[in-house]
Amino acid sequence: MPVLVLGSLNHDLTLHVARHPAEGETLHIHHVSTAPGGKGANQAVAAARAGAATTMIGRVGDDDAGAELLRALDAAGVDWQHVTRSGRTGTAYITVNAEGDNRILIHGGANDDVGKDELAALNSLLLQGDRDGHRVLMLQREVPPAANIEAIKVARKLGNITVVLDPAPAPGQAADVLDLLEDFIWLTPNQTEAAALLGRDIPDRAAAEKAADELMAHNPAGVILKLGGQGAVVRSHATSGFLEPMPVRPVDTVAAGDAFNGYFAAALAEGLPIDDAAERAAIAGALSVTRPGAMDAIPTRSEVEALLD
């Protein structure tokens, strides 16, 4: 079954530094790189590399960066005919330190104009595919909140859609995410995002287990709370578990969550059990941090399956 992605497409400008600067501090940059990215585009590429027929819906600028993003989607096998072009492509300004940890600032650009046209395309695609049954829709928070709200309304109306909602960037108000949750929506926060949703720090596994249970009280289909190198908590109405971390040496963690989400959505579309879907996603996320970059770091299905075997 196909995966649809309504979300952001960004031009990534990555600054490699020994450590992140403190307030008021100036540091030298060791290396600068640029690449196509954005949470929506990264997750679409991950779903496609996982084997799902994947369609991207979003907006890029009428500029060289936008053209580069479309070429990258095409190379990954993502259908991008519903990506429109106007204005300036969104930009992510990323610093990556020697341990592979990242800090990201986003300028929305064309992503800020995602709305009526993209929602019409989403509605049309979902209606066209309705005769074939179940679909998976991926959402993130790098496009206007109203677009996600309307997309969820469309999914609710059709009644045979599973939504994977990545609450990133972390919401300023918890209600911006929690009020959206319904029993067909999977919520996939990391520690920072879960902390923003619950209004407290989540320093370890025990706190994460409790946080996932609290988030389940809002009645999503399930919650996967990602702890980076500490693993991930998995909760649903049918299962409760913990994914142990893979022992890897991180180089760049920028696309780890996107690789995880894309593989998870693809596995759901394939009809895999939740535990198997989460395991594949965790392997994809772990492999991605061993490589520099965002889109380029996302592994292929064969690489993930080699570790499953």
Image (tube, rainbow, N blue to C red):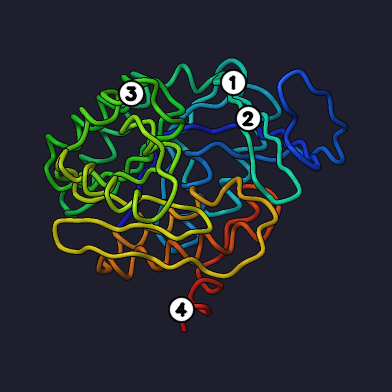
State the separation of the CA atoms marked 3 and 4.
Answer: 36 Å
Pointer 2 local density, CA inside 10 Å: few below 14, some 14–19, many at least 20: many
The answer, for residue 120, to whether it is visible in the render is no
Mark 2: secondary structure: strand
Q: Amino acid at mark 1?
A: His
Q: Nearer the viewer, residue 277 or 135?
A: 277
Q: Position of residue 278 (x, y in %)?
A: 36, 63
Pointer 4 local density, CA inside 10 Å: few below 14, some 14–19, many at least 20: few
Q: Are marks 2 and 1 in contact (CB under 8 Å)?
A: yes
Q: Nearer the viewer, residue 266 or 309?
A: 309
State the separation of the CA atoms marked 2 and 1.
Answer: 6 Å
Q: Amino acid at mark 2?
A: Ala
Residue position for label 3: 147
Foreground tag (1 vs 3): 1
Mark 4: secondary structure: helix
Q: Amino acid at mark 4?
A: Leu
Question: From the image, which quarter does the N terminus lie in?
Answer: bottom left
Q: Earlier in the sequence, mark 3 or mark 4?
A: 3
The residue at the far bottom in this view is: 309
Q: Nearer the viewer, residue 229 or 65?
A: 229
In the picture, measured across the screen, residue 85 lies left or right of residue 134, that is right
Foreground tag (3 vs 4): 4
**Image quarter of residue 235:** bottom left
Q: Earlier in the sequence, mark 4 or mark 1?
A: 1
Q: Name the mark on residue 278.
A: none
Question: Measuring 25% from the left and 25% from the top, which residue is drawn there?
Answer: 150
Q: Name the mark on residue 92.
A: 2
Residue position for label 1: 107
**Image quarter of residue 300:** bottom right
Q: Position of residue 94 (x, y in %)?
A: 67, 34
